Image (cartoon, rainbow, N blue to C red):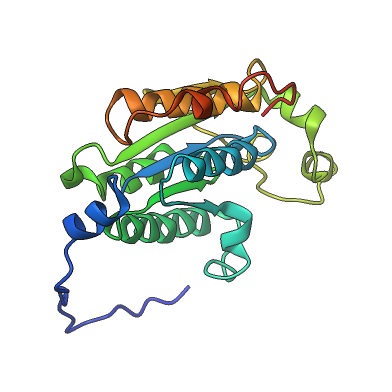
Amino acid sequence: MTDRKATNIVWHPGQVTRACRERLSGHRGFTIWLTGLSASGKSTVAVALEQALYQHGCHAYVLDGDNVRHGLNSNLGFSPEDRAENIRRIAEVAKLFRDAGVISITAFISPYRSDRDSARKLAESEHDAFIEVFVDCPVEVCEQRDPKGMYRKARAGAIKEFTGVSAPYEPPLSPEIHLRTNELTVGECVHAVMDYLVRYDYIPCAPNEMRTSYRGQPKRA
């Protein structure tokens, strides 16, 4: 990490305002921040939610933890300092998405409350534009799933500082949405989030066919 900081910079405003872009989108720009253990279902829920929002005519994009580490954050490891920088960067990207009138769905472990609080703080002046979603799944269930074999490697000592095994996870204290993905299907998780967005006027009321399209899927999140 470099200690150099930008100096002598001034924000240059554009002529197209956020309000203009939101009118074009037909909805507000806001962030849905999914946090939870590895294999808790964050990416699965995020992708299904993005599809539901797309079907509803909303402009949404998933910012996935692994995907972002392929490019923007490819120079970061998993130390507490690098994790903090990882979240700082993505929080700033999410802020730009909000300004563009786009719904960003972040799927990051983001294990530390202070880092998530910092991400939320960037949206403080934007009228509830940050929605924290706790993708809650017991670590023993996550280990049973272990689609990438990460827990097995962590238990064997091949992966250091692995959240839930050799590094801590601090669960949200008061998330806007709490999804227990060991009990709910993917469809039920998406339905819960969509209902929240409609109820609190983040998006227009959903048509009946969209509201039921994800129900009943047997796959867990």
Occupied quadrant, residue 16: bottom left
Residue ranking furthest to the bottom: 8
User: Residue at the spot x=58%, y=70% of the render?
Assistant: 71
Occupied quadrant, residue 174: top left
- Residue 2 location (% of width, % of height): 43, 77
User: Residue at the spot x=74%, y=26% of the render?
Assistant: 219
User: Residue at the spot x=40%, y=34% of the render?
Assistant: 132
Does residue 130 appear to the left or right of 39 in the view shown? left
Q: Nearer the viewer, residue 210 or 8?
A: 210
- Residue 215 location (% of width, % of height): 62, 21
Position of the C terminus by quadrant: top right
Occupied quadrant, residue 98: bottom left
Residue ranking furthest to the top: 183
Residue 74, placed above or below residue 212: below
User: Residue at the spot x=30%, y=78% of the render?
Assistant: 5
Residue 179, placed above or below residue 118: above
Does residue 87 appear to the left or right of 137 in the view shown? left
- Residue 99 location (% of width, % of height): 26, 58
- Residue 128 location (% of width, % of height): 24, 36
Q: What number of labels is visible?
A: 0
